[in-house]
Image: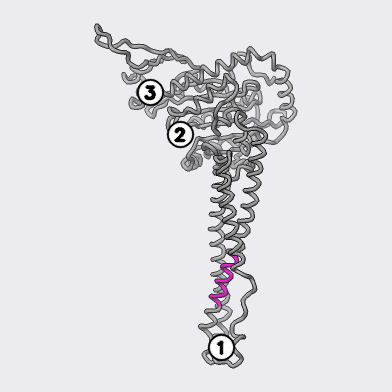
Amino acid sequence: MNRPPANKKDHVVLVALSDSRRRAYLDDQSLESDIRLLDNKSMLLKMPKATKAANSVEPPRYYRHLEFDGIGYEFDSHIRTELGDMLGQMFRHRRNGSLLRISSQRNHNPSLLTRLLVTEVDSLMVEMRCRLKAINVDYFDVRKFDMLNMLVQPKGVPKRRRDSPSGKSVSSTKELSQWLTNDLALLRGRGIGDDYLHFEFVYRDSLVLEHRVHLSVFHIFGSENRPDLVEFFTSLPRGRQNGSTLMNDCLKESFDFKSPTPAVVLFELPIAPDLKDSRRKILRMADVAYGCLDKARKMMSKSKPAYQSSTNLSKLSRSSGAGSSLRSVPDISLAHLRRTAKLSDEDYNGLACWYGRIDSKFAELKLAMEQHFVDLYQRKSLDLRSEIRSMNQDPSEENDESGGDGVRPQRPPRDLQSSSRIYSMLKKDFKKLETEAEATTYAPTLKVYIRTKNYELSEAEKVLKQREMENLRLGLIQYISASEPSISGD
């Protein structure tokens, strides 16, 4: 019942021609002289001009034949069918899926996601006689060594706690459509890396049984100059990566050939005349991806009997936990540690130790900072009250023979210098820890983590100052109001 069609490819590579004027350039000589579409799956790419022959006016026109699982516009029926088939596999066979959208520029047009996640999902729910219960969304800004969940507050969430509940939950595709159209563009405007959107669909079938499927959507930008992405695809037939980035670590889960899940790799091909170089580079990368995926698939099919039993065991273990409510978001807290080609168990323990040291020192420093500002503003409050009493004091009381000790009450015994000294010492210790971390082999990862902690301290300091200033203001108003009757009575 839950088996996908035997002849259906798990990983599909599509090339989508993208242009705001849509088909405006299809009949243009600028496109025809560069690429020629043969059908829905093949095209010719003109090679660089050869040296002109002595007896010819123009050099020979050489073309390279390229083949993919689909070529056309995003709104063409065969492109929409491939995307719809992936979603159908996910819901009908309860499998997780992935969409890689590879583009040369940041594009905030939500039409493709809206059509896929709203129109297609609604159609599947009607066809399968199911009812959608909830859609949980996470949106990560993926940098080189860090992942920032744009939907979780506060903004800087430590890696060790990024397996938190989803940042956004909606109950219908209508709400999801509104979020994609209105909120997503604003969030993406704050991002500086690639996009990683994770959708969890919770639905009930006709027997009122609850099911969950997960869709990972990656928007990878600057595709004409991404050697890390080329390295990722070329490493698939080898089964391991020589060098990886955090984005590649996330992508690995979508291209596990031993337990494959549906995945569509969509290369957006700009067709404007002035983007000829970008077009050629993207097509070369798409050709590499298509060839490497095909090679990896063939190699895996040949070696399938050797690991069939272990695969069955892994499927059994996954099915036994299918009822779990845990989401299948990649383990972001250990994203750096999944680079198996470089990190060992010793590295794992080393990073865990460093995270513990940083967290412990951060907690001490934050507590000392709070105590310092509480004492500082209490002292300011006492000084201001003393000045107010001096201004309102009867001059005759200044010559009081009792010595005047009763005029000004003693200040609390709390030592401001003590809390300030502790705070200053812990700041130096934290800075020293940062310097030590920069000298380790984990420096790139730890620098990002400490930078996040410093940002949290800066934000906490602003909040503390605002709170204590407000307390100071309210306290002075109350003190002056209480002193007015005695002043007027004199």
The image quadrant that residue 280 belongs to is: top left
- Kindly identify the amino acid type of the residue bearing the numbered disc 2: Asn
10 Å crowding of disc 1: few (<14), some (14-19), many (20+): few
Give the distance between the C-alpha atoms of the residues marked 1 and 3, in whole angstroms.
88 Å
**Kind of element beneath mark 1:** helix
Disc on res. 440: none
The residue that disc 2 covers is 109
Left or right relative to 293: residue 47: left
Colour option used: one colour
Tag 1 residue:
489
- Which secondary structure dominates the residues rendered in magenta? helix
Relative to 287, 377 lies left or right: right
> Where does the magenta region start and end?
373-385
> In the rendered view, would you say 54 is above or below 180?
above
Which of disc 3 and disc 1 is earlier in sequence? 3
Residue 153 belongs to the span the image colors magenta: no
At 57% across and 84% down in the image, what residue appears? Answer: 485
First of labels 3, 2 by sequence position: 3
Q: CA distance from mark 3 to mark 2?
A: 17 Å
User: On the picture, is 338 further left or further right than 46?
Assistant: right
Label 2 CA crowd tier, 10 Å (few <14, some 14–19, many 20+) = few
Q: Closer to us: mark 1 or mark 3?
A: 1
**Residue 23: image tag:** 3
Residue 32 seen in the current view: no
**Residue at 56% over, 70% down:** 474
